[in-house]
Amino acid sequence: MTQTNEISMNEQGERFDLEHLLRWPDGKIELEIPDGVLPAPLIAAHNAAQRGDLDLARALLAEETLEIVRHLEEGDSPGICLVWLILAMVHHRCIQLQQALSWYERIQSRKPHALVYNEMADVYVGLKDFTQATWCRTQAIELAPECPHLQGRCAVDLILSGFLEQGINRLRALVRDHPSESGLHATLLWYQHYLSDIDQETLSAEARLWGQRHAPQGSVAAFQTQPKSDPNRRLRIGYVSADFRTHSVAYSVEALLDGRDAASAEVFGYGNVTYRDEVTARLRSKFDGYRDILKQSDLAVAEQIRRDEIDILVSVGGNTDGHRLGVFALKPAPVQVDYGGICTSGMPQIGYRLTDRILDPPPMQPHYVERLVYLPEGYVCYRPSDQAPAVGPLPARQRGFVTFGVFNNRLKINRGMIALWTTILNQVPDSRLLLKFPGGGDRPLVERLLAEFARAGLDPQRVSVRPMLGLRAHFALYNEVDIALDPYPFNGCLTTLEGLWMGVPVVSLTGHRYTSHVGHTILTRMDLSFFVAQSEREYVAKAVALAGRTENLAQIRASCRPRMQASSLCDAAGYARHLEQAYRAIWEDHCHSGLRPETGPILIGNSPVVGTGKKTAASVAQSWLR
């Protein structure tokens, strides 16, 4: 935390000194302002925003507060830039992005500053204007060229703007030059999964390197593992996540909380949530105990977990933004588990990985430091949104042409997929492609994408691009799509679930990486594995064949939602039961370790991922295309 005397205006109000903040590990502004320095309502709004009470923060930015600010502006107060900075930060934190931008711009009108450009870039990322974000971050780097975090975030801006390879090359160079920066390395780990020409072995090796550098086993010395205990006693399970909020992860977490057996285990949540919302509050009420760990050190969190006597500590989401793997490096719980990571954690301190036989088939075990634990009905559970409208009629019947849809993020749209989708559309006369992704309103980004389709041989007039929409409008847009095309090698997950819920069949290409098995596991659980392609040729053939049978498409559309409701994907109680069985099996394995050798993956229920079990499902699916 900084003190106010570290951020000051000179007597003429022409400059304020923020250079020292650029040396912070995360490059973020955080302030602690003593009482009496700034207007009390503004300080209160700042403090409320920092602790996540966003409704109160918004309320405190009332007209009377702004009137005080106007008075300070009229007097040309020497500290006016600090006032503007606090206003910008509060609006930014409250997701009032246009207001935040206007205050940041006032500061820049006095004296351009690297840190303010950096904050403006974050606002533009929130607005999904990645081109403008890249420009602001570039300006920040020109003013502070020695800051690796600005360089890293500019690399991510490039990636989000559609320059995937260039951005990743920059990240690799930064990781090489700054090997101690765990955040930069974690960012590289994540974005490498979008590359088409990288294999699972390379991804896993990079994750192991991250673990060796930033979470070495020597750090376990801070805590002594609890003695082994009764394998049958009631367990205490702890979940650590930055995504206890409106996020795809929350679907599965809420399902297990709703369906759990309280007699089997107590559950604790450790939330590293930056932007708390109504989902945060709802989840919090469903845990037996909840701890807000956002501002706490790894050591403090680990000590809390020890005091809570957690038996099994679960890392939710792996090495993603906001992760707290530094806590797991200290091994505060005797058993630690990965849940939902797209790659190995690379940390021997995490002993188990919840997955299924399709996502991580047995030959994948060497790619993980964790022991695989197979859930019989997959690791995903879907809680349908109440914002989803009824499934509409087949668009092709009304329009006279088929519309393919891809609502996945822009990073998943690579040259290989553009070539495949071009082949599909050129084999289906008059068909259209509807894309929707964050940045769909960023004109330079969209123009570059349409130019790529043109180079692949598809008339750009047949491609429509939509920006991000509100949740209700997002679901309604599926009523304009006949067939969804899953990207490769990074399949969709929530996007696929939402499309199926809206009656849109998904053609998915599977491969040899975890991220290219997601569509396969979801479709299998609905007995729709026929729509999974094992090769590019089969992917094209299935999409084209499906487009040629509009009557059958209408049948599929009408049947998808009821099939999904009847499947294990929406069975919260069954999902929670299988997780509880997995935790019990993991705990027993821990208690008996050393007494028997490891024998590979742990099977829960001794069954592979299956669908509804209806004998006719697969044959019906195939008959649709005959």
Image (tube, rainbow, N blue to C red):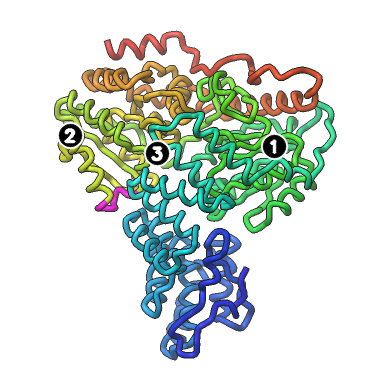
**In the image, what residue type sits under mark 2?**
Leu
C-alpha separation, residue under disc 2 versus residue under disc 1 = 50 Å
Q: Which residue is mark 3?
A: 388
C-alpha separation, residue under disc 2 versus residue under disc 3 = 32 Å
**In the image, what residue type sits under mark 3?**
Ala
Q: Residue at x 59, y 23 (%)?
A: 365
- The picture places residue 193, in percent across and down from the top left corner, at 45, 37
**In the image, what residue type sits under mark 1?**
Gln
Q: Which residue is mark 2?
A: 458
Dividing the picture into quadrants, the one containing residue 615 is top left
Secondary structure under the numbered disc 3 in the rendered image: loop
- The picture places residue 568, in percent across and down from the top left corner, at 52, 23
Dividing the picture into quadrants, the one containing residue 401 is top left
C-alpha separation, residue under disc 3 versus residue under disc 1 = 41 Å
Q: Are there few (<14), some (14-19), or many (20+) residues within 10 Å of tag 3?
A: some
Looking at the rendering, the stretch of residues picked out in magenta corresponds to 439-444
Relative to 398, residue 85 above or below: below
Q: Are marks 2 and 1 in contact (CB under 8 Å)?
A: no
Q: Are there few (<14), some (14-19), or many (20+) residues within 10 Å of tag 2?
A: many
Residue 330 on the magenta segment: no
